[in-house]
Amino acid sequence: MDRRVAKAGKFWDRAARGDGTWYVATGYLHQNDEFFAQGARETDTFLDFCRAAPAMGQAQAVLEIGCGLGRMTHRLAQLFARVVAVDVSEEMLRRCRGNLKSFSNVDYLQVPGDGTLEGIADEEVDLVFSYLTLQHVPAPSAQLRYLENSARVLRAGGRIAVQMRSASPVASVESYAAHAVHLLQGRHTYGRCWRGSHVKPSVALQRLSSQGVDAEALVWPFRPALCPPHLWLVGTKAPTLT
Ligand SMILES: C[S@@+](CC[C@H](N)C(=O)[O-])C[C@H]1O[C@@H](n2cnc3c(N)ncnc32)[C@H](O)[C@@H]1O
């Protein structure tokens, strides 16, 4: 495995044990009702933006890549019949499970972080959803493997809504400014496990297309100060020809 990717589990375990809520959603210092309420609002907003909300009355399954403390998983578990919540960090998963103990429709899976999704069968889910996660994956090859495997686990006609870092020179300058601010606050975000890596949208879309997913890259128009603009890869897996 890529040496940088191999460190991700430990980095995020440490983050979960320390300022977990801040590392999951910067700005939140406590895990309180508002932390989950904001996660629910964002989930609804992004499902809508990506045209990926579950159809009324249909029992659908969603895979969430990078569930963290369950900030959005909580809402996904209300909306979908089944949620498969995966994360590279054992500690994030442990806390997520604790936060969602009232839900019986969530399965938890620790993954190595290299983009493999072993334990999830081909065509097992109706939607692959991921927010604030691929942007932290330190190797482009691992990000692209996540996209390939997302296509594999999607049923024909299923949707993908996966957010990535957008690579613009302005965004890079802003990211460095943010690292400086975080460092002044005593948080270390300069390492690769936070900074992640860049994948060109055209390369990401090409990878999805080679796996039968017709997708487009949409820029989310709103963002907090010093936060790089978010790019969503949104698409549908081609229905099987009969
Ligand atoms: C910033 S948090 C976001 C969590 C959640 N998506 C949310 O918005 O509340 C990033 C999450 O992705 C997980 N993560 C980081 N790198 C990963 C990787 N390579 N594979 C899977 N999960 C990863 C971290 O452990 C962490 O839980």
Image (spheres, rainbow, N blue to C red):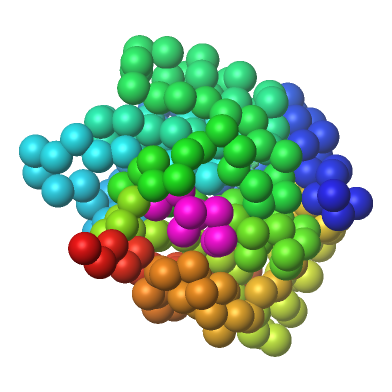
| Location of residue 167 with respect to 64 vertically, above or below | below
| Location of residue 36 with respect to 125 vertically, above or below | above
In the figure, residue 18 lies in which quadrant? top right
Q: Residue at x 61, y 19 (%)?
A: 94
| Location of residue 190 with respect to 199 vertically, above or below | above
Q: Position of residue 155 (x, y in %)?
A: 34, 51
Q: Residue at x 56, y 33 (%)?
A: 119
Q: Residue furthest front?
A: 242
Q: Is residue 29 visible?
A: no
* Quadrant of picture, ligand 1: top right
Quadrant containing the C terminus in the rendered view: bottom left
Q: Relative to 145, is 77 on the left or the right?
A: left
Secondary structure character of the magenta stretch overall: helix
Q: Relative to 197, is 155 on the left or the right?
A: left
Q: Relative to 61, is 196 on the left or the right?
A: right
Check if residue 157 falls in the magenta segment.
no
199 and 35: which is toward the camera: 199
Q: Is residue 206 visible?
A: yes
Q: Residue furthest left?
A: 57
Q: Position of residue 111 (x, y in %)?
A: 66, 37
Q: Position of residue 66 (x, y in %)?
A: 57, 43
Tally the numbered discs. Answer: 0
Q: Residue furthest right?
A: 3
Highlighted magenta segment, given as a residue range: 147-154
Q: Residue at x 75, y 30 (%)?
A: 13
